[in-house]
């Protein structure tokens, strides 16, 4: 179920990046694709009825411990994705202020 959701989010974001002509929609597609990739990483590291790998009095077999590396990578990726989205939106605002349009084809046709 989670694999289907993550692949769907990645494909929706890829569609928005490749097909849409508005820069804001492209940035939104990038953010959706980033969320799908993060969900995929978390899904790969998930174990049904797993426990956290912490020291405790109860002995847990290594097969039932959840791997913390994908979770740490996703936390880092969320911060990086937020920063990339903020910089991309700042660039979109600058492009709009300079060219007065957000259409990619019109921006490409304008030469400085």
Image: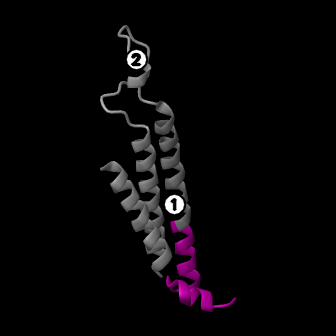
Q: Nearer the viewer, residue 80 or 67?
A: 67
Residue 24: horizontal and vertical position, in percent?
Answer: 46, 73
Which quarter of the picture shows residue 45? top left
Residue 52 visible in the snapshot: no
* Residue at (51, 34) in percent of width and height: 69
Residue in the image at 34% along x and 27% along y: 50
Q: Residue at 38% of width from left, 54% of height from top?
A: 6
Considering the numbered disc 1 on the image, is that residue within a helix, a strand or a loop?
helix
- Of residue 106 and residue 38, the one placed in the foreground of this image is 38
On whether residue 90 falls in the magenta region, the answer is: yes
The magenta region covers 89-112
- Per the image, the residue denoted by label 2 is 61
Q: Which mark is residue 86?
A: 1
Q: Where is residue 80 in the image (x, y as percent from the top left)?
A: 54, 51
Residue 38 at x, y percent in the picture = 45, 49
Q: Distance between the residues labelled 1 and 2?
A: 43 Å
């Amino acid at each position: 179920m989670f694999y289907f959701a993550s692949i769907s989010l990645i494909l929706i974001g890829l569609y928005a990046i490749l097909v849409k002509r508005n820069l804001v929609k492209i940035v939104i597609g990038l953010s959706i694709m980033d969320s799908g990739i993060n969900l995929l990483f978390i899904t790969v590291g998930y174990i049904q009825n797993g426990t956290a790998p912490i020291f405790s009095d109860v002995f847990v077999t290594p097969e039932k411990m959840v791997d913390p590396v994908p979770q740490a990578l996703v936390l880092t990726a969320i911060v990086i994705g937020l920063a990339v989205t903020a910089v991309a939106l700042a660039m979109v605002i600058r492009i709009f202020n300079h060219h007065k349009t957000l259409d990619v084809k019109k921006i490409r046709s304008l030469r400085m």
